[in-house]
């Protein structure tokens, strides 16, 4: 059996908003680890409650299902429980009726990785100084980019007008259609980056590669990302930067 040795650093900040509606969470079992970033939506409708609930429910699911194989059914069951919790919350606390959250979830399972997301929080996989995988935003702006109606520069200018096409809201409001991707085996010195859109509004793919590919320590790379967000982001900003240190063979 193979296992991953990694270093990971996280950050979450209120930024220029009145409160922080992002939530981040991570956890580890013997041969599995998870990282999650959620960006709550709703303002007065308690976006911070939405992001925290999603993290809480998944963290509990992760620890209660240690022996369950990680596959698409695993994630669908977890999201089902999160949506159920949203429906219950809305009934017991009517002031949260409009809440929703994005989700970007990464699982390291032995030597492999899975990506799950809904909304515009992102997951990147960087190998050999290139972005080999990036989640595709579930947003109206992303659709306009896809059909060539706007340029990437125009998309960044329109960031404040983001309208999500997918988010966790509860099954009774609108069931979410999550994107699940098996990233396969990780390699030594791969990087994985999860972040909310408060990061991507100011840290372009090109800037991210510049930061990751220099000779700084993981701590310095993470600090550089935060500095750009502090200078340029108008939103909360949160993320995890993970460096794969080695892949080890373990005796059964």
Image (cartoon, helix red, strand yellow):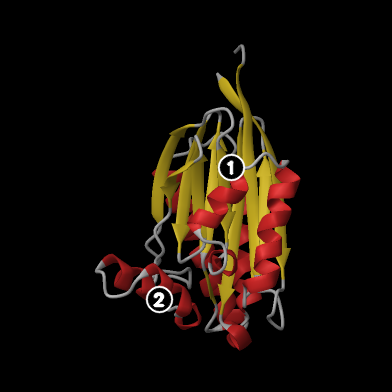
| Residue shown at the point (30%, 73%) measured from the top left | 144
x, y percent for residue 182 = 41, 40
Q: Quadrant of the N terminus?
A: top right
Q: Which label number is shown at residue 98?
A: none
Q: Which label number is shown at residue 154?
A: 2
| Residue shown at the point (59%, 69%) measured from the top left | 198
The disc, 1 or 2, on the residue closer to the chain's N-terminal end is: 2
* Tag count: 2
Q: Is 164 in front, or is 56?
A: 164
Mark 2 residue crowding within 10 angstroms, few (<14) / some (14–19) / many (20+): few
User: In this picture, is 107 found above or below 84?
Assistant: above
- Is residue 149 shown left or right of residue 212? left
Residue 23 falls in image quadrant: bottom right
User: In this picture, is 70 found above or below 89?
Assistant: above
Q: Quadrant of the C terminus?
A: top right
Q: Is 154 in front, or is 48?
A: 154
x, y percent for residue 42 = 56, 82
x, y percent for residue 207 = 55, 56
Q: Which residue is mark 1?
A: 213
x, y percent for residue 54 = 58, 63
Q: Regarding mark 1 in the picture, which secondary structure is present there?
A: loop
- Is residue 156 shown left or right of residue 149? right
What separation in Å lies between label 1 and label 2 (alpha carbons)?
27 Å
Residue 235 falls in image quadrant: bottom right
User: In this picture, is 210 found above or below 46?
Assistant: above
Q: Regarding mark 2 in the picture, which secondary structure is present there?
A: helix
- Is residue 200 shown left or right of residue 239? left
| Residue shown at the point (71%, 43%) measured from the top left | 218
- Is residue 112 shown left or right of residue 222? left
């Amino acid at each position: 059996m193979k296992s991953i040795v990694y270093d990971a650093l996280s950050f979450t900040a209120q930024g220029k908003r009145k409160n922080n509606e992002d939530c981040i969470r991570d956890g580890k079992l013997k041969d599995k680890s998870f990282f999650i970033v959620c960006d709550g939506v709703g303002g007065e409708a308690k976006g911070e409650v939405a992001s925290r609930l999603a993290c809480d429910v998944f963290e509990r699911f992760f620890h209660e299902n240690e022996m369950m194989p990680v596959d698409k059914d695993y994630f669908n069951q977890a999201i089902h429980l999160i949506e159920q919790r949203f429906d219950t919350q809305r009934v017991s606390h009517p002031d949260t009726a409009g809440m929703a959250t994005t989700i970007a979830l990464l699982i390291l399972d032995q030597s492999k990785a899975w990506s799950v997301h809904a909304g515009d929080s992102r997951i990147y996989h960087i190998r050999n100084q290139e972005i080999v995988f990036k989640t595709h935003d579930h947003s109206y702006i992303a659709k306009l980019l896809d059909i060539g109606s706007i340029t990437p520069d125009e998309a960044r200018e329109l960031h404040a007008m983001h309208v999500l096409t997918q988010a966790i809201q509860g099954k009774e409001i609108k069931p979410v259609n999550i994107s699940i991707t098996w990233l396969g085996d990780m390699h030594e010195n791969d990087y994985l980056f999860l972040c909310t859109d408060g990061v991507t509004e100011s840290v372009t793919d090109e800037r991210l590669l510049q930061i990751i590919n220099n000779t700084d320590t993981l701590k310095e790379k993470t600090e550089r990302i935060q500095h750009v967000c502090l200078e340029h982001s108008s939103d909360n900003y949160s993320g995890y930067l993970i460096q794969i240190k080695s892949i080890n063979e373990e005796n059964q």
